[in-house]
Image: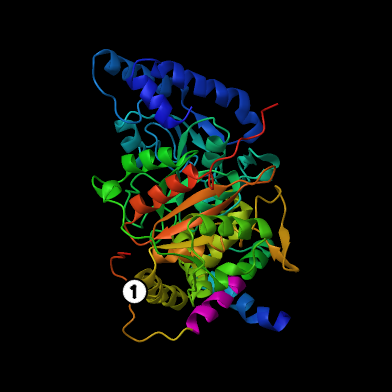
Amino acid sequence: MTAAEIAGAVRGRTVRARSIVAAALARIAAHDPELNAFTSVFAERALARAESIDAAVSAGEDPGPLAGVPFAAKNLFDVAGVVTRAGAKVTASDPPAARDADAIAALERRGAVLVGATNMDEFAYGFVTENAHDGATHNPHDRTRIAGGSSGGSAAAVAAELVPLALASDTNGSIRVPAALCGIFGIRPTYGTISTRGAYPFVNSLDTIGPFARTAADLTAAYAALAPAGAAHAGPLTGRRCARLGGYFGDGLLPAARRAVDVVCAALETSAVVELAHARQAREAAFLITAAEAGELHAQRLRRRADEYDPATRDRLIAGALMPASWYVRAQRFRSFFQLEIAAAFASYDLLVAAATPYPAPAIGQRSIVIDGVDTEIRPNVGVFTQPITLAGVPVVTVPIVEREALPVGVQLIGRPGSESFLLALAEELERLGVAGAGAVPVFA
Amino acid sequence: MADDAAPVAAYVDAAAAALGMPLNAERRAGVSAAMARLASFAADVAAVELADDIEIAGVFVP
């Protein structure tokens, strides 16, 4: 069931929230061992919360537009009484969180029910969710492949229909990459729109919070619950001047990713192409800012406890902690420059379209992939199309494109700051047209 | 290649010593590789000419 169907049934008294949540818990117990999407399940809390929703409905109260909708949260979100892992071992001895993260509280205020926490790359520093401590999350479309990262557990849980919604974070592409590889919808909101309080920090200059869903309507409902009052209902923009991003975004991708952009642009009836002249440097600046801010955040712990870090994360964090300040400052100044460059593109177009990843999900453990005859390292490059957009802080909705009997890929719908409602409406339109949509996952064994 | 990597490795050694960041041999190699990537990216970003009045966003508002 979609989130909309669940909420409608719970509010309409045709089903009890408790039975919805119990069924979600049963699905997780039965199928998550094949996926490794969850690192914790909060059965007692979830059932108690569901019963309180049922009690409210019985008393004639409206529990909200997400009544009884089970959701998962990446394990970097604070959950009251639980230690916030952020995919790490070094955090295991931290004190439990005193209260829920703002994003969890916002969804629960509208009737949703947190059922568990999900796997991720350590401290969100990766695109693969092959976590040294918690193992790899398996892609529901092909269990031998990665789910993408860093929010891979949340994406896999939604793609496999264990829950209809999940919370995630996106710094350099950690919502857009796993949404694409798992074939679901995801939104990275305008930087600064949604409270990050209670989400373990990674890169303060770039961190955002957003949801995953299997339908565009569910994504819109989840975003509306998370966004400040008015932000999600600012009204759709008039006109629709669309262009695909060329140049940097037109090179270095496999045919499946290119076809996905073609399909979306055809549906939007655009053949316009626009280039961001400094997209490559934008990606590099985001990379530098990430290294410096994340490295500084962890420097003290790394001096004493580096052995407890995931080897895939540790050396990059140390390099960031040691890098010269001039590189960081230059990257931040470049960010202001690039902000003007993307604003110039939005003077002519309302929507920019680009592939979310250069290829469908690689195999778990795969180190490189050949693109245009060049052997390309996977881990640092999965986010090559999401990172430049990150730097500009603009909102992006990733829509899934699933070809018959093929692995899913995703397309980024990129808008002006604050244009989330426009992007979400476009995602709904593309879904209605049959262009975008979450594909069915292979039946569980 | 070795010549390109040498200054970065020397920088990593010096910075780690100055900042009190312990590095064993394996970690030194991994950190040097990561620093080399950062150095390459930093050079590319630095090559973009920026007017002096392009400043860091104090409060970033996209």
Q: For the view shown, which residue lies furthest in the right direction?
A: A373
Dot 1: element: loop
Q: Nearer the viewer, residue A351 or A252?
A: A351
Residue shown at 36%/38% (left/top)? A221
The reply to whether residue A347 is visible in this rendering is yes
In the rendered image, the quadrant that contains the C terminus of chain A is top right
Residue shown at 52%/38% (left/top)? A118
Q: Nearer the viewer, residue A300 or A409?
A: A409
**Is residue A12 positioned above or below A333 on the image?**
above
- Residue at the spot of label 1: B56
Image spot of residue A211 (x, y percent): 43, 43
Residue type indicated by callout 1: Ile
Residue shown at 71%/48% (left/top)? A363
Magenta highlight: main SS: helix
Image spot of residue A245 (x, y percent): 51, 68
Query: Which span is picked out in magenta?
Result: B35-47
Q: Quadrant of residue A134?
A: top right
The reply to whether residue A386 is visible in this rendering is no
Q: Quadrant of residue A249?
A: bottom right
Horizontal side of B62 relative to A405 (left or right) equals left
